[in-house]
Amino acid sequence: QVQLVESGGGLVQAGGSLRLSCAASRSIFTINTMGWYRQAPGKQREWVATITSGGNTNYADSVKGRFTISRDNAKNTVYLQMNSLKPEDTAVYYCKVVEIILTSTYEYWGQGTQVTVSS
């Protein structure tokens, strides 16, 4: 089991920046993939960014060039640096980790943190 706690959300003006953090309750050294998702009111949850254990990153087209995902294994934490924020980035942001042990895959989600971007 892994408990995830997100933080860093808040209210920011368009063009501003925020850094989200997702702290895991134990070592993430064995975690295969860590990612961020978001869900805006009335919309389905969507993928934002992913980072693998090897440090490979992928981003949704809507955030590419503005958001950066990173992980610090020593602190058991994954980050999402969000720059040049737009009102359409307003959503609850969730952290998700995927752990593969032998032939079993485990997914864990955080409780979410609200990001609101005003125009």
Image (cartoon, rainbow, N blue to C red):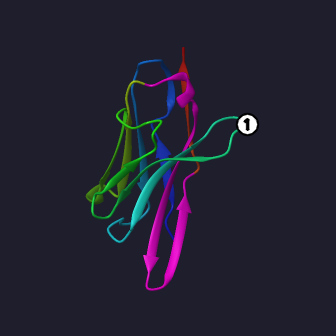
* Point 58% across, 46% down: residue: 46
Q: Where's residue 15, x and y in %?
A: 41, 18
Mark 1 sits on what residue?
A: 42
* Point 39% across, 24% down: residue: 84
- Hey, what amino acid is under mark 1? Gly
Residue lying at the far right in this picture: please name it.
Answer: 42
Extent of the magenta region: 85-110
Residue lying at the far bottom in this picture: please name it.
Answer: 102
- Closer to us: 29 or 44: 44
Residue 63 on the magenta segment: no
* Point 39% across, 26% down: residue: 17
Which quadrant of the rendered structure holds the C terminus? top right
In which image quadrant can residue 92 be found?
top right
113 lies above or below 85: below
Q: Where's residue 12, x and y in %?
A: 48, 21
- Closer to us: 68 or 31: 68
Give neighbour class at mark 1: few <14, some 14-19, many 20+ (Cα, 10 Å). Answer: few
Left or right: where 44 falls relative to 11: right
Residue 101 on the magenta segment: yes
Q: Where's residue 116, x and y in %?
A: 56, 26
Secondary structure at badge 1 equals: loop
| Most frequent secondary structure within the magenta stretch | strand
